[in-house]
Amino acid sequence: MTRVEETRLPGVGVRYAFATETGQRLGVIVHRDGHRELLVYDRRDPDACAAALGLDEDARTLVDLLGGSEVTERLDEVLSQSIEGLTLEWVEIPDASPSAGARIADLGIRATTGASIVAVVRDGRTTTSPTSDFVLLGGDTVVLVGSRDAIDRAAQILRRG
């Protein structure tokens, strides 16, 4: 297994670096605002950066080309697991869903299903413990926790109203 070094960069984000099997050092800086840079280090000086490529939307394309989509699909399967009756699941809200544009309080998910919304992922950013006034949008991914039955009912409300 390749060893990945993690270095916090105060005010910037986090840098991850590793050496390939051929000895080439690569890195990625994940900025606090979500921007990413791919770093290629100079072979003669492992601390000097020979090239830095900004990757925003291109990062997804690169991940797909490197087979990351398959990893994500497998990870989704693992993350939708039950632990002694407790289920944690990610549910994406379709743009056409009646839930898009609604406040969490207006949906009454906790009261009617028993499931709880513990986070909302929007544009790559996560809001943990969203308040009842939080407005859901199409494309949001809602993280639900509860029993399998409660999650299924909550997902139906989020997807179809």
Image (tube, rainbow, N blue to C red):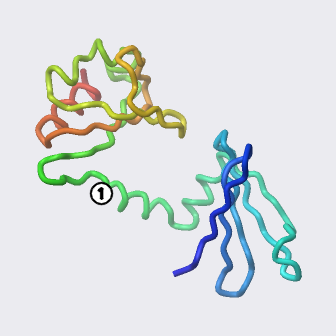
Q: Residues within 10 Å of mark 1 (few under 14, many from 20)?
A: few
Question: Image height check: is 44 above or below 99?
Answer: below
User: Residue 67's spot in the image, x, y percent?
Assistant: 51, 66
User: Residue 73's spot in the image, x, y percent?
Assistant: 38, 58
In screen coordinates, is 78 left or right of 82?
right
Foreground: 104 or 4? Answer: 4
Question: Image height check: is 13 above or below 23?
Answer: above
In screen coordinates, is 46 left or right of 134?
right
User: Residue drawn at (19%, 38%), measured in percent from left and top?
Assistant: 146
User: Residue 64's spot in the image, x, y percent?
Assistant: 54, 60
Q: Which residue is mark 1?
A: 77
- Image quarter of residue 5: bottom right
Foreground: 35 or 160? Answer: 35
User: Residue drawn at (60%, 71%), measured in percent from left and top?
Assistant: 4
- Image quarter of residue 136: top left
User: Residue drawn at (33%, 42%), measured in percent from left and top?
Assistant: 90
In screen coordinates, is 43 left or right of 160?
right
User: Residue 112's spot in the image, x, y percent?
Assistant: 14, 21
Question: Image height check: is 54 above or below 121?
Answer: below
In screen coordinates, is 48 left or right of 7?
right
Considering the image in quadrants, where does the C terminus appear?
top left
Q: Residue furthest bottom?
A: 22
Amino acid beneath label 1: Glu
The mark total stands at 1
Look at the numbered disc 1 and give the secondary structure of its residue: helix
- Image quarter of residue 44: bottom right
Foreground: 87 or 62? Answer: 87
